[in-house]
Amino acid sequence: MEGALSELIHIRAVNFRPLQTDIASGDFSPLGVADSIPDFGTSSNEVFIWHAYAGILPITASEVIRFGMDAPRGFNLILSERQVQPDCHSVDTFDFRIIEPMEISKWIGQAVLSGDLTVSANEDNNSITDQRSIQGIGHSQILVLSPLLDFKTWANQRGMDGTPSSPILLNARLWTVMGDLQGPNGEIESRKWEIIEDPWSQKLSLAHDLEDLHIAPTLRTIAPHESKWLSRSKLDEEIDKIIEERRRGKTGESNSSGTVRSMLLQKWSLKSGTATINFSNILIPGWIIELNPKRVLHGRNGRLYEF
């Protein structure tokens, strides 16, 4: 976590630089000093930034008071992975602010979803195999699609500014189809298709922006109800529909004016029984919206879903 915090502070802080100090700060480790950190609304001309490591016990007011006795004069910002007792915030012996774990997680999550920060996570994949050569392929790192909406803009357009929210990731699948496209006269083209199964909207779609995939951050992941995944028969049916193409015929016929190219559309379909279909897990960015009841905002289609 300290590495992610340091990297994000380097990106977001104004004039960030190392903090040279001999202070015996106990559980508070110096991260650096900056002119300001706009994300936290700091208005001081100099911000001393500290990190409190994760621990079992929460930070107490007495710890904060002891730290304040040695802290540098000026504004001290403490990024805490430990829970914080409420009376810590009322300590008035020095100028400081504590950012609690939930706010830090949200800050990092928003940075990852916006592309400013990349954090890796490992996750196991499931696999299934049947007569149509459907296989699960494992990856050590799960990838996440880029969001297609900005949460602040979305909330503003709906009069929901200030509604509590937190970034999350939604389970989906990326299907890779290897097979032959067969024309009306027996022509064969070997092809590869990549298809996203989005169980939240219960749709399949050809993947067009896979070059924008990035490694999934360490965020809460939400799985849909099992019934939301397409059944085996429905999956076959929908994949065939997506892959099928209609092409203008290349043949022509002659009349008194010469040769006329056919305007009829010919069907090219996935050759039955020969395709190999693999899937891997993929994630969709989103947000939990603190409505009553809670809803999940889909980061690509902008719709709200129950979970």
Image (tube, rainbow, N blue to C red):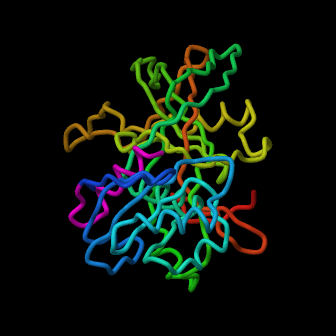
Above or below, 287 relative to 276: below
**Segment tinted magenta in the rendering:** 1-17
Q: Residue 90, image x and y in percent?
A: 59, 79
- Residue at image coords 43%, 77%: 95
**Nearer the observer, 201 or 234:** 201
Prevailing secondary structure class for the magenta stretch in the rendered image: helix
Q: Residue 66, image x and y in percent?
A: 52, 64
**Nearer the observer, 103 or 276:** 103
Placement of the C terminus among the 4 image quadrants: bottom right
Q: Is residue 43 left or right of residue 215?
A: left
- State which quadrant residue 128 falls in: top right
Q: Residue 146, image x and y in percent?
A: 43, 51
Above or below, 4 relative to 66: above
- Residue at image coords 56%, 14%: 274
Q: How many marks?
A: 0
User: Is 55 in the magenta?
Assistant: no
Above or below, 156 relative to 189: below
Above or below, 167 relative to 189: below
- Residue at image coords 56%, 20%: 137
Q: Residue 262, image x and y in percent?
A: 34, 39
- State which quadrant residue 159 falls in: bottom right
**Nearer the observer, 42 or 139:** 42
**Nearer the observer, 243 or 63:** 63
User: Is 11 in the magenta?
Assistant: yes
Q: Is residue 60 left or right of residue 302?
A: right
